[in-house]
């Protein structure tokens, strides 16, 4: 059977994971499991509120939806406008990341985005919002890569933030194209090798120019190498029996971009046949629980669509109307 609603499944999965991880973020693993059990939270809270992760994913999604062409000249001002609208919104009260807030303040001052970005940050803030880039069906892989890195670079200028954002978008795109979830670690690791010295200057301009960096290839290779290292750690973890514990102990706490990707994939793959269990496992971590869970939900939804999620959740999740509109546009 062909699954036709994977964009909606991915966007709603992202929001569901975000809502499940919102109450557990900043808590220790033993505190979370004492309250929810070893499998973590499995029921949406009431009300089912999300964090800045979903808010910013929607900001990216609407910028893509509004774009007349998938080019940097068209998309950069749209992304800038959506990020600034988020930054000043009264709903931006969900413990937003300081990197995003600082970069948005610079963007609001009119700085070129390559100067406005927080150059040394590879926090996961650019990862948790990139899912929509992997859902637009008309993008070829070069366009997907350029947009994923551009949206990351507006706030997170570290090369690992750029590479991890591209890999995260690809981890959404590949299941939509028919790849099995179990294939993702190997396919993403291959991408690291293929792209190691590919600097997308048409999308990034002179972002690479930093003290001590002699070429754009040297700059971007650092990001791909760090992503390759954590994917090697993930692949090794998947070869071992599942401990049943905190996935962050194997692949990192997820506060930084490459670890958020790896820990979300580990939670998703430990429960490849039970997406709700994957969300609970991802939310029951001592790391960045909401970001890890939202990505795990995005990956599962991209692979199998809306039917994998409890039907009663769709009307309860915050921003359901926006998630449904964007999902329908790309399905």
Image: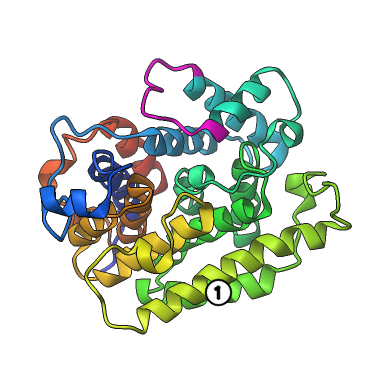
User: As displayed, is residue 126 above or below residue 321?
Assistant: below
Q: Position of residue 45 (x, y in %)?
A: 15, 37
Residue 197 vs residue 245, the one in the foreground:
245
What element does badge 1 sit on?
A: helix
User: As displayed, is residue 106 above or below residue 243?
Assistant: above
Can residue 93 be found in the magenta stretch? yes
Left/right of residue 75 with respect to residue 236 in the rendered view: right
The answer to whether residue 176 shows anywhere in this view is no
Residue name at image x 25 percent, y 40 percent? 19
Q: Main secondary structure of the magenta part?
A: loop
Residue hosting label 1: 189
The magenta segment = 88-99
The answer to whether residue 273 shows anywhere in this view is yes
Q: Choose top left, top right, bottom left or bottom right for residue 241.
A: bottom left
Left/right of residue 76 with respect to residue 323 in the rendered view: right
Residue name at image x 29 percent, y 30 percent? 319
Q: Position of residue 143 (x, y in %)?
A: 63, 54
User: As displayed, is residue 86 above or below residue 74?
Assistant: above
Quadrant where the image shows the N terminus: bottom left
The colour style of the image is rainbow
């Amino acid at each position: 059977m062909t699954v036709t609603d994977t964009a909606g499944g991915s966007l709603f999965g992202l929001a569901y994971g975000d809502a499940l991880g919102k109450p557990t973020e900043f808590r220790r693993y033993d505190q979370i499991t004492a309250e929810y059990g070893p499998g973590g939270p499995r029921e949406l809270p009431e009300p089912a509120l999300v964090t800045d992760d979903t808010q910013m994913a929607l900001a990216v999604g609407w910028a893509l939806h509004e774009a007349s062409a998938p080019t940097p000249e068209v998309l950069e001002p749209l992304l800038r406008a959506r990020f600034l609208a988020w930054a000043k919104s009264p709903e931006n009260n969900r413990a937003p990341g300081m990197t995003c807030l600082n970069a948005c303040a610079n963007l609001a001052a009119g700085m070129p985005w390559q100067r406005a970005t927080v150059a040394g940050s590879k926090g996961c803030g650019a990862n948790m919002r990139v899912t929509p880039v992997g859902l637009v069906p008309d993008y070829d892989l070069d366009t997907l890569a350029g947009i994923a890195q551009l949206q990351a670079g507006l706030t997170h200028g570290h090369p690992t933030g750029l590479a991890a954002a591209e890999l995260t978008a690809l981890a959404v795109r590949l299941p939509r194209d028919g790849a099995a979830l179990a294939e993702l670690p190997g396919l993403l690791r291959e991408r690291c090798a293929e792209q190691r010295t590919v600097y997308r200057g048409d999308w990034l301009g002179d972002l690479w120019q930093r003290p001590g960096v002699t070429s754009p290839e040297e700059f971007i290779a650092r990001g791909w190498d760090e992503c390759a290292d954590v994917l090697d750690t993930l692949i090794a973890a998947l070869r071992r029996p599942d401990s049943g514990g905190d996935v962050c102990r194997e692949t990192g706490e997820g506060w930084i971009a490459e670890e958020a990707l790896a820990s979300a994939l580990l939670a998703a793959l430990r429960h490849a046949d039970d997406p709700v269990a994957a969300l609970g496992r991802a939310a029951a971590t001592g790391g960045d629980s909401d970001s890890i869970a939202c990505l795990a939900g995005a990956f599962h939804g991209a692979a199998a669509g809306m039917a994998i999620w409890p039907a009663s959740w769709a009307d309860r999740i915050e921003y359901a109307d926006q998630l449904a509109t964007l999902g329908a546009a790309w399905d």
